[in-house]
């Protein structure tokens, strides 16, 4: 169940608070003392009050089963309001001061024709929020959603003015593409159509065999990746077809425009092993040595793709269309597409990336992330120009996603601090502390220790809220 955490920093003091998200999945689960809605890797327990025939019938009527609203992935900011969400269509308002929730549940499907949306909405400089969603079925596709900033005094419904401004047709009806995030620059969006699919038939059959949604994932390395470029101002999908070798990505890092090119950085995988490495069974049974061997074999790297925006019709097939200096990325005409080969910024295992948010969609230099493919985890800072990597780690400490907080009057892009909630494993108990690192040197400035052993779980994503 989604557990929302909060570290409040004020006048040199740090307080910690956590509350379960009051989702329908949580409330009904407490009432019935069982998991009532299937999650990503967990299926719902059958209702003991139903007859065997009723339970069997529910297996064959999957649309009648409630879909989870357990928003345990990320928080989305719309105006001055915050919403917990996952990749299904439901979001739930959270009070950042008290962490209270449950009063307002909003369904994307009532406002735009999508069956779900990513957990990584993008906030533009004018307050507009953009997201990518999926619509299933015969005319399914991948939809770019625009959520205008609320008018003054307008609260309680972030989606009432939402609209779909672009739709990319789905190629394979029963196999929609899975995606977790997308890229945004000042003038464009990029949707990565990766050969990583959801088998709809397996999703429907999963409850019969006791499987979660994870059972339905399929990676087809024989199918190339395609990049779709969408104009922000018009919603027009550019006709140039950009392709690359098969890969997977969950997290985009940043993207920007540079002299007629679109530069896009993301965390890439050459195979889908990473999806299954963090099952509880593995975490409970692997030794530290086994974990490092398994996690280190995920073929994870930071890829920089450079897409030429102005492609002449009469170019030879072997000419590199990337004219930017300082990059090893290339793009050539191949058959009916522009075939892109990325520059590998680092082959270090790297995920949960963050940047200075003021540089989102703009040319930038520094990436902060977590190496979750080593035991224990460690924090990483990557310089995209020099390729230098700086690590922070401590024995038996597992670091969460780093959050960069810019200094009040910054003199450089990395002038600020990096915050990360760290779990320190111990024999029979664990403790948690908020780690504060210097954004430039990546050295520790301090930490705020929770005073007693606790059961704080690992976190996935988080945000910084100023002036609380």
Image (cartoon, rainbow, N blue to C red):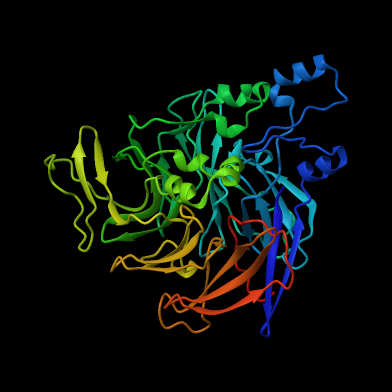
- Is 10 rendered above or below residue 224? below
* Picture residue at 46% right of the left edge, 61% below the top: 369
199 horizontally vs 252: left or right = right
Q: Position of residue 88 (x, y in %)?
A: 63, 40
Q: How many marks?
A: 0
Quadrant in which the C terminus is drawn: bottom right
Q: Position of residue 438 (x, y in %)?
A: 48, 78
* Picture residue at 46% right of the left edge, 52% below the top: 373
Q: Is residue 419 visible?
A: yes
Residue sitting at the far top = 53
Q: Position of residue 147 (x, y in %)?
A: 59, 52
Pick the front one: 116 or 397: 397
* Picture residue at 84% right of the left edge, 39% below the top: 33
Pick the front one: 52 or 151: 52
- Is 98 rendered above or below residue 226? below
Q: Is residue 364 visible?
A: no
- Is 241 rendered above or below residue 454? above
Q: Position of residue 372 (x, y in %)?
A: 49, 54
438 horizontally vs 31: left or right = left
Pick the front one: 28 or 468: 28
Q: Quadrant of residue 294?
A: top left
């Amino acid at each position: 169940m989604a557990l929302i955490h909060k570290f409040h920093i004020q006048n040199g003091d740090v307080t910690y608070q956590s509350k379960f998200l009051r989702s329908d999945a949580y409330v009904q689960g407490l009432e019935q003392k069982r998991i009532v809605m299937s999650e990503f890797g967990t299926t719902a327990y059958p209702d003991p009050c139903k007859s065997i025939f009723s339970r069997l019938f529910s297996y064959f009527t999957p649309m009648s089963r409630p879909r989870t609203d357990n928003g345990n992935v990320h928080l989305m900011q719309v105006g001055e309001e915050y919403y917990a969400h996952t990749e299904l269509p439901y979001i739930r308002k959270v009070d950042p001061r008290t962490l209270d929730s449950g009063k307002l549940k909003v369904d994307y499907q009532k406002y735009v024709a999508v069956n779900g949306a990513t957990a990584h909405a993008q906030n533009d400089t004018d307050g507009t929020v953009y997201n990518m969603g999926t619509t299933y079925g015969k005319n399914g596709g991948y939809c770019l959603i625009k959520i205008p900033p609320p008018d003054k005094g307008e609260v309680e419904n972030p989606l009432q003015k939402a609209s779909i401004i672009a739709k990319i047709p789905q190629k394979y009806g029963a196999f929609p593409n899975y995606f977790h995030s997308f890229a945004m620059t000042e003038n464009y969006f990029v949707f990565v159509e990766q050969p990583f699919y959801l088998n709809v038939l397996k999703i429907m059959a999963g409850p019969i065999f006791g499987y979660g949604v994870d059972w339905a994932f399929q990676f087809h390395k024989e199918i190339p990746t395609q990049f779709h470029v969408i104009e922000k101002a018009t919603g027009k999908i550019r006709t140039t077809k950009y392709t690359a070798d098969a890969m997977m990505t969950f997290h985009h890092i940043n993207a920007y425009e540079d002299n007629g090119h679109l530069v896009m950085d993301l965390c890439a995988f050459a195979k889908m092993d990473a999806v299954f490495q963090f099952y509880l069974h593995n975490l409970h049974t692997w030794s530290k040595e086994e974990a490092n061997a398994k996690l280190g074999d995920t073929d994870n790297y930071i890829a920089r793709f450079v897409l030429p925006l102005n492609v002449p019709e009469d170019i030879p097939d072997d000419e590199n269309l990337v004219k930017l200096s300082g990059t090893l990325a290339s793009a050539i005409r191949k058959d009916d597409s522009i075939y892109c080969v990325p520059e590998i910024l680092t082959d270090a295992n790297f995920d949960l990336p963050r940047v200075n948010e003021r540089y989102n969609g703009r040319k930038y230099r520094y990436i902060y992330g977590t190496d979750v493919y080593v035991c224990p985890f460690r924090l990483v800072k990557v310089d995209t120009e020099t390729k230098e990597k700086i690590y922070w780690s401590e024995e038996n400490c597992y670091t969460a996603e780093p959050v960069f907080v810019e200094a009040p009057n910054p003199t450089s892009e990395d002038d600020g601090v990096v915050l990360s909630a760290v779990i320190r494993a111990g024999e029979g108990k664990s403790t948690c502390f908020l780690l504060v690192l210097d954004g430039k040197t990546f050295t520790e400035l301090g930490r705020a220790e929770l005073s007693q052993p606790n059961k704080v779980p690992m976190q996935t994503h988080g945000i910084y809220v100023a002036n609380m």
